[in-house]
Amino acid sequence: MGQGRVAELTRNTKETEICLSFHLDGSGMCRAETGIGFFDHMLDGFARHGLFDLEVSCKGDLEVDSHHTAEDVGIVLGEAIKAALGEKKGIRRYGSIILPMDEALVLCAVDLSGRPYLGFEETYTAQRIGGLDTEMIHDFFYAISYSAGMNLHLKQLAGTNNHHIAEASFKAFARALDEAVSCEPRISGVWSTKGTL
């Protein structure tokens, strides 16, 4: 996957076995094999629209439900984002976007502050999209925000199609994160009065 801001992690529990590689300065390539087709589709959209390279394989207890797979992938992806950023020197830190997808409109804002928080205001009218329980969309982003140590807000401004709302959320997160991790040559060190993020 090249040199630079890259992380490769594994995480094995009684519920999931995950191998993940993540490159912040990629080209949008993705290979996701989680056993949940819709979740793989969302991860592909995230990588493609953030111009990240992502490889993830997860063998989870899908005979139970999608919970452990979605949440644990979120944990490992958050850890990979944090590891790839290193000391966060020179990054913009903040990123935001309002992203449309047909009738859906989603706001996403990110602060790579080191302080975890998720604000999530989205409404799904279906219990599942493909093989993914829709409540797991919240839990996936919650896991990322806490394991990466980021302040993350997702807010649905419009939308009725569950697929479109979910996809707009993953793509909006990708675009906001890409902005937040991008380098600003005018910043020396980290962008914080504390001197650390």
Image: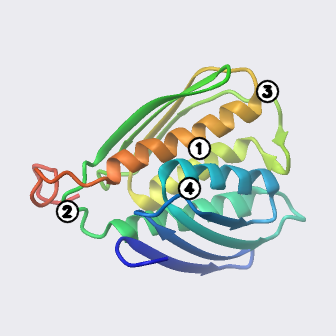
- What residue is drawn where x is 54% and y is 58%? 28
Q: Earlier in the sequence, mark 4 or mark 2?
A: 4
**Which quadrant, please, contains the C terminus?**
bottom left
Amino acid found under the numbered disc labelled 2? Lys
Which of discs 4 and 3 lies nearer the camera? The answer is 4
Residue 113 image point, x, y percent? 29, 51
Measured Cα–Cα span from mark 4 to mark 3: 26 Å
Query: Does 151 sit above or below residue 11?
Result: above
Q: Which residue is mark 4?
A: 47
Amino acid found under the numbered disc labelled 1? Phe
Amino acid found under the numbered disc labelled 4? Ala
Q: Which residue is mark 1?
A: 170
Q: Residue 134, labelled with which disc?
A: none
Q: Which residue is mark 3?
A: 125
Which of discs 2 and 3 lies nearer the camera? The answer is 2
Q: Which residue is mark 2?
A: 89
Q: Earlier in the sequence, mark 4 or mark 1?
A: 4
Q: How is the image coloured?
A: rainbow
Measured Cα–Cα span from mark 1 to mark 3: 18 Å
Q: Earlier in the sequence, mark 4 or mark 3?
A: 4
